[in-house]
Amino acid sequence: MNEQETRHFFERYRDAFNELDGDAVADLWHLPSSISDSETDANGKPAARVTLWTDDAPKRKNMRALCDVYMLNDFARAEFEFDHFHALGANHAFANVHWQLWRKDGSLLQEFHTAYQLLRTAKGAKVLMATAYEEDVASMKLAALER
């Protein structure tokens, strides 16, 4: 996959989030696909957490819930830029993406990086794997509860 095709994918991905359309976001993920992040274990040490989606329903539920968290935080739009792009042959690409999430009042909701491996399919590029190593959904959930 080339950089132009990958950028086009992320424009569609961003637009799905900008519409807060969890189903449209989920449609851009492959089955199976996975996302990893880290949490702190009982001893205060980092521990890997991997979510593997082999069925559509849990993947779709997750993306809808994420869009709900954004909505509850007065999300207005997302913007992105590539920090790094690397073609991985004809049908794969890796991109480390810098995201900025903006509220309706123009303030920054959150800024983070996420790494993605994409796969070209008959229906276009899809996320095969993602590593969410900076996004803090938990703090957005807490902020939404405090509103």
Image (cartoon, grey):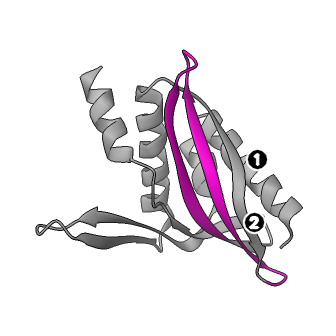
| Mark 1 touches mark 2? (CB < 8 Å) | no
- Give the x, y percent position of residue 108: 52, 29
Q: Quadrant of residue 88?
A: bottom right
Q: Residues within 10 Å of mark 1 (few under 14, many from 20)?
A: some
Residue that mark 1 sits on: 11
Q: Is residue 47 depicted above or below 99 in this figure? A: below
Which residue reaches farthest left? 42
Q: What secondary structure is marked by label 2?
A: strand
In the rendered image, residue 87 lying in the magenta stretch gets the answer: no
Q: Quadrant of residue 9?
A: bottom right
Q: Is residue 51 depicted above or below 28 in this figure? A: below
- Give the x, y percent position of residue 140: 36, 37
User: Which is nearer the N-term, disc 1 or disc 2?
Assistant: 1
Residue drawn where x is 11% and y is 67% of the image: 42
Residue drawn where x is 42% and y is 27% of the image: 73
**Which amino acid lies under the numbered mark 2 shown in the image of this protein?**
Ala
Q: Is residue 41 left or right of residue 9?
A: left
- In front of the other: 6 or 125: 6
Q: Is residue 114 depicted above or below 105 in this figure? A: below
- Give the x, y percent position of residue 146: 25, 24
Q: Which residues are magenta?
A: 89-117
Q: What secondary structure is marked by label 1?
A: helix
Q: Is residue 29 depicted above or below 104 in this figure? A: below
Residue that mark 2 sits on: 125
Q: CA distance from mark 1 to mark 2?
A: 12 Å
Mark 1 against mark 2, which lies toward the viewer? Answer: 1
- In front of the other: 132 or 68: 132
